Amino acid sequence: MKLNKFVKILGGAVLALGMLAQVHAADTKVDPSGTYTWSQPGRNGGPDRTNTLVLKLDGDKLTGKMMAPGRGGAEPTSTEIKDGKITGSEISFSVTREFGGNSFTTKYSGKLENGAIKGKTEMERNGETQSRDWEAKKQEDKK
């Protein structure tokens, strides 16, 4: 009888520790701080456009800026990210750009793993949401 009670207590303790380990693992945040780059096809068959994203994690706040090539060979433009969030290894943010008196917001979301962010971008165009795959690779810090 005492052995049966001991087995039940031991089983309950193992189950509780297992649940705590899963909760802790799900809540563990990665640090996305660093510089990431990705390319996208140029317009009308033009050369690929390389974008650069610099992220910084400060506590729970994700900040950063995105640099995109200027149109027609103009200087690259830098835009601060907005609404930066991180939950575990999932990140999201948005970038709003101005062009021709109009503003365009692109929402980025993805999962950070193995030195890359893989996910989706979404933007409104002509009243419809357009979505694309997105993968940015972390660049090594230059010392």
Image: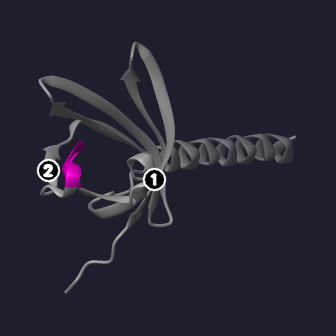
Observer-nearest residue: 44 or 102? Answer: 44
Mark 2 residue crowding within 10 angstroms, few (<14) / some (14–19) / many (20+): some
Give above or below for 107 relative to 44. Answer: above
Q: Which residues are magenta?
A: 58-72
In this orientation, which residue lies closer to the viewer: 126 or 13?
126
Label 1 CA crowd tier, 10 Å (few <14, some 14–19, many 20+): few
Work out whether mark 1 precedes mark 2 in sequence or the reverse, and give the earlier one. Answer: 1
Q: Position of residue 97 (x, y in %)?
A: 19, 35
Residue depicted at x 15% and y 43%: 80
Q: Position of residue 14 (x, y in %)?
A: 68, 48
Q: Position of residue 78 (x, y in %)?
A: 14, 50
Question: Can residue 101 be spotted in the picture?
Answer: yes
Q: Residue at x 35, y 33 (%)?
A: 107
Q: In this figure, which residue is indicated by the disc labeled 1?
A: 45
Q: Is residue 57 visible?
A: no
Please name the amino acid that badge 2 sits on. Ser
Q: Quadrant of the C terminus?
A: bottom left
Q: Residue at x 88, y 40 (%)?
A: 1
Q: Is residue 48 left or right of residue 63?
A: right
Residue 81 percent location from the top left of the image: 20, 41
Residue found at x 14% / y 50%: 77
Going by the numbered disc 1, the residue's amino acid type is: Gly
Q: Which mark identifies residue 78?
A: 2
Q: Nearer the viewer, residue 114 or 60?
A: 114
- Above or below: residue 95 compared with residue 88: above
Magenta-drawn stretch, dominant element (helix, strand or loop): strand
